[in-house]
Image (cartoon, coloured by chain):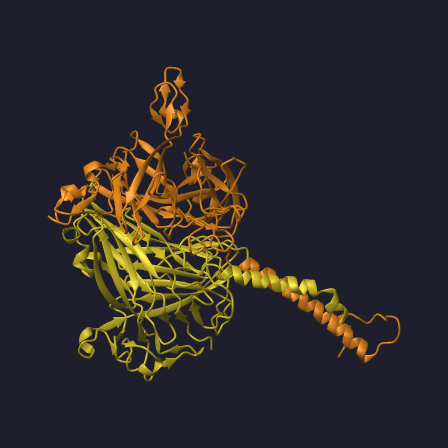
Amino acid sequence: MRGLKRSPWLFSLGVLLAVLALYRGFARADVTSDRPGSIVVYPKVISDGVRDTLIQITNTGNMPVNAHCFYINTNADVPGVCSLTFSTPCTVDAQCPAGETCVHCGETDFDIFLTSQQPTFWGVSAGRRVNLTDNVRGFDPGPIPGRGTDFVGELKCIATTAPSATTPGQPIMQNVLKGEATIIPVGGGADVSEYNAFTIQATGGATGNDLALGTTYNACPASLVVDHRADGAVDTFTGLPVTSELTLVPCTEDLENQLPTRAILNLVVVNEFEQPLSASLNFNCMLNQPLSSISSNFSRGVLGSDFAKTRITPSTSSICYSGTNRNRICSTDADCPGFVTTTSGTKLGCRPVTGLLGVIEEFQSAKAGTGSAAVTAHLEGNRPGDVIILPPTQ
Amino acid sequence: MDRTLFRNDVRLAGEWNERRWAMVKMARLGSAGALLGLGLGVCLLAQVPSARALTTSDRPAAILVWPKIVVADGTDTIIQISNTSRTDRKQAHCFLINANGHCADTDAVCSSALNCPSRAGFATCVPGWSETDFDIYLTKDQPLAWNASAGLSGADLPITVNGFCDYPPTRACTHDSECGSKCMTVQNNLGTGIPPVPEIPFVGELKCIEFVPGNPPVPDASNTLLGEATIESMTGPNNDVPDLQKYNAVGLQACAAADRPCGPNATSAPTLPNLQLGGDASTQEYQGCPTTLILNHLFDVGRRLVTDLTLVPCGDDLLRQNPGMATAQFLVFNEFEQRFSTSKTVRWFFESQLSRIDTPDPDRSIFSYAISGTLAGQTRIKPVGDAPTGRGLVGIARQLFTDRGISAGAAYELHQQGNPTQPDIITVP
């Protein structure tokens, strides 16, 4: 008892610090693109033979960090599943029931290890081998698979405990990872686009394999805002027409059951005369399209001004994430018969439509070459309810 | 249980008995628990991110900083600013800061004495800092953009009418007398006058502060501005290949906003003339600038691949024309976790190729691939100093590639860490 009498202040201090730490963690819960986190999301990763992507990721902490990374490939060469009857494999839309599309959303995962403060990089097409004698100098972060020239997708890395030979590591709170992606031309040239990866900070608490954004990790934004040119507007300095490509990825992802996430969203584009135009949109797994393909409202002719601002807001509805009514609007789990429950116990029944993260890339093309620039979307507010489901550790 | 496991086999007064042993166990377990609690607390405190009290490059804010605006022969900067308020017209009071140096004898623009040849050799290149301020009025949800070389004003503004008549509905009006019955006012850009950069070539910074339009205008704490800049140039042997480098402006959110971006205890509304960024929560008005900026980069490889860094102080005395100053300490890590360091004074505006920060000879620099030994690097930039405007810094980086005679690149934002204890001050005229 003497020990308890002697050290209650010490125990109280510890508890106070723990409470303070958790309180501070919950003070503001937002995804960011300019500070380190436990999850790093690169929404736009290209290796299609014309362009390649250089991934940079850094440990900003003084302790080593492991991370489990997932490439998500939406290239048409990847075996797909039908958008509603997701158990039906396909390679083209014609192999799916009427009204459905073939969704390509293949996942490949790997582990990396970074020593304290270590930066590292790799090219997506070639990956990086563990070979201390090759000409890529530095501590190799681990065997990173090359993706060849048929990759258009996303990269997500999650801080974990050290993996063993048979099991991947467990997600942990280690808000030290940051990253950038540089999209470069393959055949030479200097046309490059670079953006900061989004980071999601862990806020404490047990995570398990189902990472709850808004609870144990920061939440995704309530909406995205991008400033951009009207498609087809002529740049007053270069005299060249401008096009933009919007890339969006869902915050909710089921990497255990490999079910592509369906996003439903609303776009409100406001021109310089403060006139709003809107469009609605849905996609599976990832959106990577020129603005003009998304809606004619983005064209210079319709917008009537050279510059515009677009607010991208996920639907406030809920949909079935699995079961026979998959991807259909629902109000309770009962509307989603046959829904799946993950190994960690998350019900993939009726859940809020996924939040979004995104990047916009601008292009100007001349006969002699193309110029491009990418920036991350601005973020507004936050919305809980997203979840990233990792494959089980066993 | 083996009591020696606890290394407590020393005899105390009296004989050991089970009760005493139980007490000792509880005491030790208590101490162990206390230490465990303390350790847990310290660990969590160290690991958990602090309240979001730092600058932001991805959220709407009340102060925007574009660290790099460039206009030169063959180069221009497109500046974009948007109001994200869905209801209110906003005023941004902006300061365009000219950081050009000028030759002491000819007043020509220079970046070093080498640009100032004279009969006696080279004249001094005198560093410069001068600001021009102007207003931008944005209607609800409105985006606006202009070329830094040309500015934006008058008939080029999108909405230049006070209102429209109820009848005839297309007639612009100022008073009811001009209409059939009533002149319905609309939000507009009247009052906006964005000047072109004062000289070409130009290099400098743009800072905009959000106000509630009125007389006198009051600093606005609603955090509804966001911005970007695109540095455009034509490159290649024939200057016919476009190069675009776009970055998000750095934002500082006002603490008094409803969502308390600086934490629950920082609630002070901003007041003129001194705007306090960071510091003590009881007086803090805006988010603080970070204690450390983090730059991921590739080490410079000759002229083929270089990274260009721009830093500007967070605090400026715009009233007395006394710009901010700090010393930037650079801590550089390569892929072998080996450390290098150097430092450089940032006087109001700093721009340099990384491998020229520590030496005039890039091949000898700690930022060169030849010296660092690896391609990827992390540089942590810690500002120190005691200037009255504070010591915080913000910045952007540009990665520049040269291939087959074409030089082009990409701009990106710096990451940040650490809440400052010392505030930065922007003093507004």
* Residue lying at the far left of the rendered structure: B168
Hue used for the chain lettered B: orange
Q: Residue at x 63, y 63 (%)?
A: A14
Quadrant into which the N terminus of chain A falls: bottom right
Look at the image and tell me whether residue A186 can be seen: no
Q: Residue at x 45, y 67 (%)?
A: A215
Image location (x, y in percent) of residue A67: 46, 64
Hue used for the chain lettered A: yellow
Count the marks. Answer: 0
B221 vs B180, nearest the viewer: B180
Image location (x, y in percent) of residue A297: 18, 57
Query: In the image, is residue B93 above or below residue A25?
Result: above
A266 vs B305, nearest the viewer: A266
Image location (x, y in percent) of residue A214: 43, 66
A218 vs B285, nearest the viewer: B285
Look at the image and tell me whether residue B427 can be seen: yes
Q: Residue at x 73, y 69 (%)?
A: A4
A286 vs A324, nearest the viewer: A324
